[in-house]
């Protein structure tokens, strides 16, 4: 059921902030099934961005690589954030197939981590980054 994946994603991102030049929360995205392939053009259409907006695609492993690592010098807050990212990655891997990351825009970037649900819809999470 669509609500199950949405609830799992909400729980996994509760209190989690994506840090760049700003700290941004995560929001659940759920788009109706519209073909078998999610490409840059489809993400722009479904998210309401102009079709000429810059899009960078990356794997979820690449996106989460540094976010899920813990370092010996981490304090409690950093360790808790890494654990939350590990939990989010686990939910995405368990609940969605073919998940990938789309970074839309320049400087103020919308980040979509989206895959296919068991029902065939597209679902995932969205956050923002500021990179100057």
Image (spheres, rainbow, N blue to C red):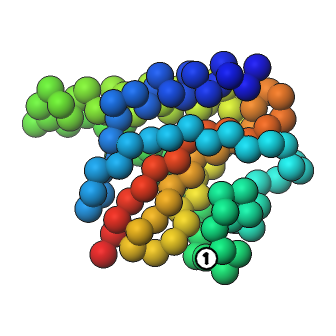
> Residue at coordinates 84% horizontally, 43% vertically from top-left?
33
Mark 1 is surrounded, within 10 Å at the Cα level, by few (under 14), some (14 to 19) or many (20 or more) other residues, namely few
With 85 as the anchor, is 35 left or right in this view?
A: right
Name which quarter of the figure residue 132 lies in. Answer: bottom left
Compared with residue 104, is residue 34 higher up or lower down, i.e. above or below? above
> Residue at coordinates 20% horizontally, 35% vertically from top-left?
78
Name the secondary structure under disc 1. Answer: loop
Q: Quadrant of the N terminus?
A: top right
Looking at the image, the residue that sits furthest to the right is: 35
Using the image as rendered, state which of residue 45 and residue 54 is in the foreground.
45
Q: Is residue 87 visible?
A: yes
With 38 as the anchor, is 101 left or right in this view?
A: left
Compared with residue 129, is residue 80 higher up or lower down, i.e. above or below? above
Name which quarter of the figure residue 15 lies in. Answer: top left
Looking at the image, the residue that sits furthest to the bottom is: 52
Q: Is residue 59 visible?
A: no
> Residue at coordinates 60% horizontally, 70% vertically from top-left?
55
Name which quarter of the figure residue 84 lies in. Answer: top left
Compared with residue 125, is residue 19 higher up or lower down, i.e. above or below? below
> Residue at coordinates 10% horizontally, 36% vertically from top-left?
73
Q: Residue 31 at what x, y percent from top left?
A: 73, 44
Count of labels in the image: 1
With 99 as the anchor, is 15 left or right in this view?
A: left
Looking at the image, the residue that sits furthest to the front is: 48
Q: Residue 68 at what x, y percent from top left?
A: 36, 36
Residue at mark 1: 53
Q: Residue 37 at what x, y percent from top left?
A: 82, 53
Q: Residue 40 at what x, y percent from top left?
A: 70, 65
């Amino acid at each position: 059921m669509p609500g199950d994946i949405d609830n799992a994603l909400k729980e996994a991102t509760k209190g989690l902030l994506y840090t760049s030049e700003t700290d941004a929360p995560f929001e659940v995205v759920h788009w109706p099934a519209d073909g078998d392939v999610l490409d840059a053009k489809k993400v722009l259409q479904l998210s309401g961005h102009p079709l000429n907006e810059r899009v960078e695609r990356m794997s979820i492993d690449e996106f989460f690589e540094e976010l899920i690592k813990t370092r010996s010098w981490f304090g409690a807050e950093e360790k808790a954030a890494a654990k939350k990212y590990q939990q989010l990655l686990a939910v995405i891997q368990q609940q969605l197939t073919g998940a990938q990351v789309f970074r839309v825009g320049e400087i103020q970037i919308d980040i979509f981590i989206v895959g296919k649900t068991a029902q065939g819809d597209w679902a995932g999470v969205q956050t923002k980054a500021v990179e100057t």
